[in-house]
Amino acid sequence: GQVYKLKDYKPTDFVVERIDLTFELDPSETKVVSRVILHRREGVAADAALVFDGDELTLDSVQLDGNDIDPSLFDVDEESLTIRGLPESAPFEITVNTTLSPDTNTKLMGLYRTNGVYCTQCEAEGFRRITYFYDRPDVLAVYTVTIIAAKDDAKYLLSNGNFLGSGNYDEGRHFAAWFDPHPKPSYLFALVGGDLGLVEDTFTTMSGKEVALKIYVEHGKEGRAGYAMDALKRSMKWDEEVFGREYDLDIFQLVAVSDFNMGAMENKGLNVFNDKYVLADPETATDADYANIEAIIAHEYFHNWTGNRITCRDWFQLCLKEGLTVYRDHAFSADQRSAAVKRIAEIRLLKAHQFPEDAGPLAHPVRPETYKEINNFYTATVYEKGSEVVRMIRTILGADDFRKGMDLYFERHDGDASTIEDFLACFAEASGRDLKQFALWYSQAGTPSVSVSTDWNEAAKSFKVTLEQSLAPTPGQSRKALMHIPLAYGLILPDGSEFNGQPQGGEAGNGVFHLTKRKQTFSFTDVPGRPVLSINRGFSAPVNIAMEQSADDLAHIARHDSDGVSRWQALNEQAMRHLVAVSKLARDGRKLPAAKELAKILVDTAADESLEPAFRAQALALPAESDIAREIGSNIDPDAIHTAREAVLSEIATAGLAVFSKLADRAPTGPYSPAAEDAGLRALAGTALAYASIAEAEPVRAKAAFDASNNMTAMTQALQILVHQFPGSDEAEAALAAFKSRFAGDALALDKWYAIQAMAPGAGTSARVEALLESPDFDRKNPNRMRALIGSFSAGNPTGFNAPDGAGYRLLAREVIDIDKRNPQLAARLLTAMRSWRSFEPRRQKLARQALVSIREAGKLSPDVGDIIERMLA
Ligand code: B3K
Ligand code: ZN
């Protein structure tokens, strides 16, 4: 396949002025007419041809200014339409007529049908599956869209922008027309047609304009859209208050569909969502679902400015909209909930998904410089690390200059297709700071390491902190330059108070060390007593810290740090060290040591009523098996890690049984509220239930909790304990059967049933997954269902997926080959679960390689899967 390179960027030869689209919807023969007004860009040769992108299209005819073009003047191939002999300078109109078959579009890119509803997905390159066009983000045009359909086939006809009008045709057909005044790239185009339930509200913007808000869902699910509507209104308000951004159309529409390749899509004025991130009620959605809905509604809404009004010049700049918009949705959620607990969850997620990506064969810079298949770059690195980079800009500049830089960005680039250079220039200008070295965060892949050592001189009352950075090679980048790493810190004195003196040796304002050289020493004087260093507070930089810190020092931080995130970091670090040590002993078949101290500090934390329940739940959630594996890094034996972690869990559980059994009953009692406070109580109760069940080694308590549960959070907590800790028990099987019959026909609830079983630890799970794949209600065409079963198994079950006989790897390989024939994006995404295969012990590595090679040799692969396989085997 072709390799695309950042450095090859070149604008189009022709400039698009506007585009008018007409759709006649039909399940197998949708007719599309596209009229585009263009002119030749100044300086472009008079004989240069117009080359439009296309993919799996049937071209019916093509006209220039209303007349059929002579066949000798145009060519069509697999991926383009080329037209020659066009006017030298005057504007002209190209009309392209194509026919599509939405019903057989299984890639879920372009125009397809889901549950009888017509819908589109165009980012990144789906518009070219609708008509021939310049399908690239730097071509901005004003769109007018007319949709015609049989009324009984599509009751609502929706597109971007403001409503122009609608009317009836003969034979039970009708039409609707839409006009979007904001120039946009084709990836933001959307169309929806179907018979849906509608929930309506309004929002009055800061300048007093009333905006109609409409959420469309499957009939009968209207009652589950209330939380999404509420989250939308809060997002609109927040963006006005925090970033000064007002909504810019008369109407904002959101459609929930059940077959969708990702979470949601920010099409201008017409967001399309995976229904998993819209629909919620206490009976079918967990607290985590509610939090995700809030975050994703906000994320897509925030794209209206960061992504839509200011878009990307090319797909290499994807992080310009994604990293920034994730940063904005994080800031929103932090404001709506407990900021510390939210930050802890972000750190966990970043380390679980982005760090392994950055440490393996799929590592790439936040702004990649080459790609073969852009779909494979919607990654944790572009999104989550991209957000961390924006967060670091704020840390370096401070809140005021950060806001000034954002204001400047909005003012200067509104209506542009921009670059990371444009973005950084706004912050450099607003703050007067040179961000050249900082910009390396966008171009260098890999997680930097910072080794930290300290030196206390009792006689001189001086304290020295020495920091040294390094960055290992990543694919295509063997040599790395020194980065600008902002490390927030605190010096905690013996009495728990904080030392506020300024150090010598480098820039260190506002409690942040700016590490810019390979090695730097910051020296503090007049320190009253030996301080404990709390470093990378709040995870100010996405780096690995290597530091010898005693258990006592970690405990001191855990007790006294003024920053809640740092207190959690210290607890987590202590747990991680112990788990790594015990895992290594388990791998060597040695006797496992006791975890007395760790157990004590965690049980004390659990019982500490001065701490937020959600914080206590986070503290008690030990690093996952995959976190421990990442920390160990190589020659991984997932069974040893599992054994070690279970032993530690059991020791904590036994030590704290009295505390846990009390907390397990402390879930909120009133009517269900998804608010953070109640969710925190439920999280703590669920964690306590798990520990109590471990200590008692009996499923009775969890089964009683399952039977008594009156919301999905409590129900899935109990079900998971039963299925994971007491597999095969009567209680587990009974609960599974009860859940299944209660939620038969509710796809989103059943996804949880599949996922919990797929994540049951142990080598036996692959047989269970095989059996579940054969269930009569298992819909292989539904991405949520595939992710729930295959995705949860391969990415969320270390001992099951990495079973020593290789059965898990073979299962995934077989499914990826099969899915790839229908939906390459989904196949490629599922396959990334194997990205860390080289970090396992030799026997598993060999089996994993065999599975990967079997995919490579399976015949014709999509560019999506082909690209991932090639990089993973390189
Ligand atoms: N921009 C979309 C993602 C599109 C993915 C295309 N493969 C959703 C989002 O990030 O908001
Ligand atoms: Zn996004």
Image (tube, helix red, strand yellow):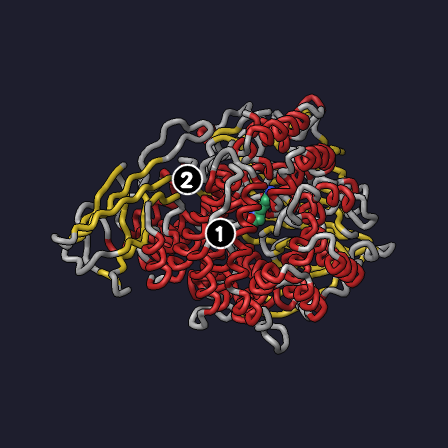
**In the structure shown, which secondary structural element does the residue marked by tag 1 occupy?**
helix
**Separation of residues labelled 2 and 1 (CA atoms):** 15 Å
Q: Which residue is mark 2?
A: 447
Report x, y in % for residue 785: 71, 49
Verify CB contact (< 8 Å) between mark 2 and mark 1: no
Q: Quadrant of residue 718?
A: bottom right
Report x, y in % for residue 30: 77, 43
Q: Residue most toward the front?
A: 591
Crowding at dot 1, Cα within 10 Å, few <14 / some 14-19 / many 20+, comes out as: some
Q: Which residue is mark 1?
A: 348
For the N terminus, which image quadrant? Answer: top right
Decide if residue 42 is in sight here. yes
Q: Residue most toward the right?
A: 171
In the image shown, does 313 or 830 lie closer to the viewer? 830
Q: Does residue 215 lie above or below 474 as drawn?
A: below
Report x, y in % for residue 119: 71, 49
Residue found at x 49% / y 30%: 370
Q: Is residue 500 left or right of 57 when viewed as pictured?
A: left
Q: Quadrant of residue 660?
A: bottom right
